[in-house]
Image (spheres, rainbow, N blue to C red):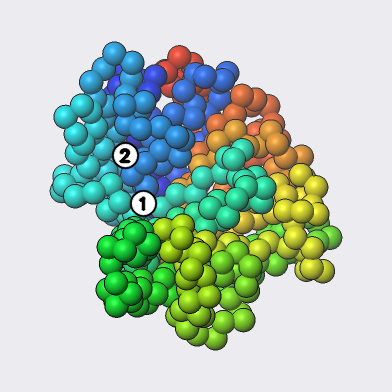
Amino acid sequence: MYLETLSLRNFRNYEEARVEFSPRVNVFLGRNAQGKTNLLEAVHLLAIGRSFRPAGERELTRHGCDAFRVVGEFVSENGVMSSVEYIAGAEGKSIRQNGVALRRAQDLFGRVNVVLFSPDDLQLLKGGPEYRRAYLDLYLAQTEPKFRHAFHAYHRLLAQRNEGLRRLRDGLATREEFSVWNETFLSRAAEVVAWRLEAVADLAPLISSYHRRLSGGSEEITLSYLLGGRTPASAARDLEAFMRQESIRREREEIARGLTLVGPHRDDLAIGFAFGYDLRCFASQGQQRTAALAMKLAAVDYLAGRTGEPPIVLLDDVLSEFDDGRKRALLHALTETAQTLITSTGGREFGEVLPSFRAFRVESGKVQEEGSG
């Protein structure tokens, strides 16, 4: 799948723009705050239904305007064309694929797949467990409709269970009533974790392989899933039984706090060196950056393997953070198969590491093609 054209109206700092892309590498050059990242944000919006930056639809609308419109025209590997249109404003939003209305933004998942590389990727190693859970959940959501259903059902049940705990604490519900909610919750929780474990099994060898390549074969890393952020999933033969046991063990604390303390919303990924040390605690920032890059490259292969089509890859000002060796390894891994959109304030380095690319100059919300490299 690749993006053929992108049209913007009153999106961020763009009054009107239309960009025609190369199926392979597209480089957007310009000073900071000119609108380069906004282009990648628009593509992400069409694929995921939300920005990758902390912004609501009001912030996505050009200053002084009431609504914005983003349209992408895509071509699949077998040549089938499709379009996605996203319109949002004060009167609501309209999302259409090939002219057919979608009910919710989340219905975009799986239609166009993307992987974003950004400076925030370091949070996969340095940040809290929510970043690593989101890493798994995003790529599962793009490939597995059953996971999307289980995930959303789980979070509805989680909200109900938290309310049930508070009612139990305040004497407004009986234990019998609560046990009914609890069994349904545990069943759905086990389903979400089972999907995540399947993804970890697929991603772990890919991450390890990419990390070896990026580190020159000098380091091995491992990936494992931790239930409750502490217990390796391999220690639990029956996920539902394990979580039921943990729920019983922490019941008093859960009721007192009115908060569910057991379930996939509390889990984590352990990312470590093969000799046992956790990268989050013992790796240098360079080693952490390499591991995060390996995780994102693995996600590209994971999506391609699951769907039969490579995702669109978005590189938002990340190349400046790598030495020439890692730049070459990254671009070589991506540009052979996946359409890649790159933003950069530089430019000269691309001729050195890319055999060919289409270059664009971005200035004050205007995009001008500069030719091919």
- Residue at position x 23%, y 49% from top? 104
Quarter of the image holding residue 206? bottom right
Give the camera-side residue of 60 and 166: 166
With respect to residue 318, does 105 lie above or below?
below
The numbered dot on residue 233 is none
Outermost residue to the bottom: 237
- Residue at position x 30%, y 51% from top? 106
- Residue at position x 64%, y 40% from top? 354
Q: Residues within 10 Å of mark 2 (few under 14, many from 20)?
A: many
Q: Which residue is mark 2?
A: 72
Is the C-beta separation of discs 2 and 1 under 8 Å?
A: yes
> What amino acid type should be assigned to the residue bearing mark 1?
Val
Q: Is residue 306 left or right of residue 289?
A: left
Give the camera-side residue of 1 and 178: 178
With respect to residue 316, does 166 lie above or below?
below
Q: Which residue is mark 1?
A: 112
Q: Secondary structure at mark 2?
A: strand
Q: Is residue 230 left or right of residue 104?
A: right
CA separation in Å, label 2 and label 1:
10 Å
Asked if residue 352 can be seen in this view, the reply is yes
With respect to residue 360, does 50 lie above or below?
below
Q: Residues within 10 Å of mark 1 (few under 14, many from 20)?
A: many
Outermost residue to the front: 171
Give the camera-side residue of 252 and 351: 252
- Residue 330 at what x, y percent from top left? 65, 48
Q: Earlier in the sequence, mark 2 or mark 1?
A: 2
- Residue 199 at what x, y percent from top left? 51, 69
With respect to residue 212, does 97 lie above or below?
above
> What amino acid type should be assigned to the residue bearing mark 2?
Gly
